Image: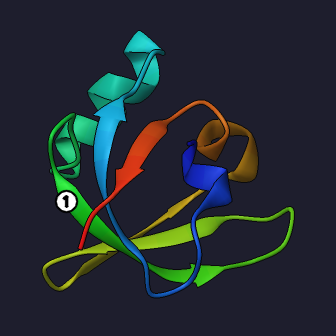
Amino acid sequence: MVLADVKKGQSFKILSIPNEIVRAQAIRFGIAEGVIVTCDEMIPAGPVIIRKSKQEIAIGYGLAREILVEAVG
């Protein structure tokens, strides 16, 4: 499944960030393959707001469609 398909409140593990530029930017925020995060908000056809610890990050819908994730818990 891709990040754009997650539901609000769902925890998931990042499996793959295929775009090298996006991967480099995500790593700066502490988001990388293997990290478990939670979806705080899902705006239809808009950004996905994810949370890792106390940090929230908004990821645009287009980008969220490229990031592969796996539900946990």
- Write down the quadrant of residue 71 in the picture: bottom left
Q: Position of residue 21 (x, y in %)?
A: 42, 17
Quadrant of the snapshot with the C terminus:
bottom left
Q: Which residue is mark 1?
A: 36
Q: Position of residue 17 (x, y in %)?
A: 40, 26
Taking the image as shown, residue 20 lies to the left or right of residue 67, namely: left
| x 20%, y 42%: residue | 28
Q: Residues within 10 Å of mark 1 (few under 14, many from 20)?
A: some
- Write down the quadrant of residue 36 in the picture: bottom left
Residue type beneath disc 1: Ile
**Badge 1 element:** strand
Taking the image as shown, residue 20 lies to the left or right of residue 14, namely: right
Q: Position of residue 54 (x, y in %)?
A: 17, 86
Quadrant of the snapshot with the N terminus:
top right
Q: Position of residue 20 (x, y in %)?
A: 39, 12
Display coloring:
rainbow
Residue at the limit of the structure toward the right, as seen here:
45
What is the total number of numbered labels drawn onto the structure image?
1
| x 61%, y 45%: residue | 64
| x 60%, y 66%: residue | 48
Taking the image as shown, residue 44 lies to the left or right of residue 72, namely: right
